[in-house]
Amino acid sequence: MAIELFNNGKHACLMFNDLVDGEKSDAVQANQFLIVSDGEGTLIDPAGNITYNALLLAMNKYFPHKNLKYILASHQDPDIVASLNKWLFGTDAQVYVSRLWERFVPHFTTQDRSVNRLVGIPDKGTVLTLRDTRVFILPAHFLHSEGNFHFYDEKARVLFSGDMGASLVHHSLVEKPITGAAEFKSHIRTMDAFHRRYMVSNKACRLWANMARQLNMDFLVPQHGRYFKGKEAIGAFLDWIEQLQCGIDLFSQDDYRIPA
Ligand SMILES: [Fe+2]
Ligand SMILES: [Fe+2]
């Protein structure tokens, strides 16, 4: 079942949370997203091959995949876009990915399938339109990938934040959003280790949080685990992430030793 983050009859933001099942495979739970706006559609972080058939079935209840205008990849990881070959074959969509990865992700494809189908996003990001809705492609470099972007749907006020805000929980827990500061506090234990190791540095977290605060957000929705709804929970997340010591902040010579 898709989670409807926003739907006013003309514009909808959908989240698919249960297509990768940790009980059936070793793969980490992952969320995929669909924005539909007055007959135009965008798929965000469609994930890998194990998700392709289930996502195809699930999304077609809301929008015919053949008509997708864009497929957006926050970064180059397998849980983001390893299904690239199938989506290129099954749609006419343009696929947006960081310029840093534009010549690397074609290794997920066969023959010349990616030729003229990929758009390299410049480091500063860009703005796309779906009918009268702007979708902002926002810089989120080093969080965690070197060339990394988040996607902001201006109409639904949803920030799709890739691995930022990710929590490692069973898919059945994902449906219920984090809504308050107290709930956020108890949720930290499901995010802490992930962010400390996968995010590159506190500097990147801080600069990103400064940018994110300028957005009018009702939802902050990561690619793994539970999402944040409302100003209180989103504010609590931004306060937490901007002070977090992570990645290279925590590494020392001890982490670079020849193993015994
Ligand atoms: Fe990733
Ligand atoms: Fe991920």
Image: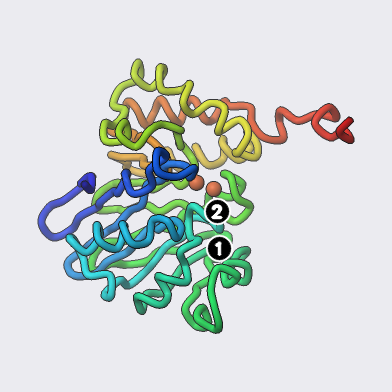
Q: Tell which residue pokes out farthest to the front in this image.
A: 24
Q: Residue at x 29, y 48 (%)?
A: 15
Residues packed near mark 2 inside 10 Å, few (<14), some (14 to 19) or many (20 plus): many
- SS category of the residue bearing label 1: strand
| Element class at badge 2 | loop
In the rendered view, does 129 fall on the left or right side of 201? left
| Image quadrant occupied by the C terminus | top right
- Image coordinates of residue 229 in percent, x first then y, are 29, 34
The numbered mark at residue 206 is none
Residue 179, x across and y down, in percent: 28, 26
Name the amino acid, label 1: Ser
Q: Are marks 1 and 2 in contact (CB under 8 Å)?
A: yes
Q: Is residue 18 visible?
A: yes
Mark 1 vs ligand 1: CB under 8 Å? no
Q: Is residue 98 left or right of residue 69?
A: right
Q: Nearer the viewer, residue 184 or 61?
A: 61
Q: Amino acid at mark 2?
A: Asn
Residue at point 32% right, 72% down? Answer: 69
Q: Nearer the viewer, residue 148 or 259?
A: 259
Q: Which is more N-terminal, label 2 or label 1?
A: 1
Residue 230 visible in the snapshot: no
Mark 1 burial class by Cα count in 10 Å: few <14, some 14-19, many 20+: many
Q: Which residue is mark 1?
A: 98
- Viewer-closest of 236 and 40: 40
Q: Position of residue 119 (x, y in %)?
A: 50, 73
Residue pointed to by mark 2: 148
- Residue at horizontal 20 percent and vertical 55 percent from the top: 12
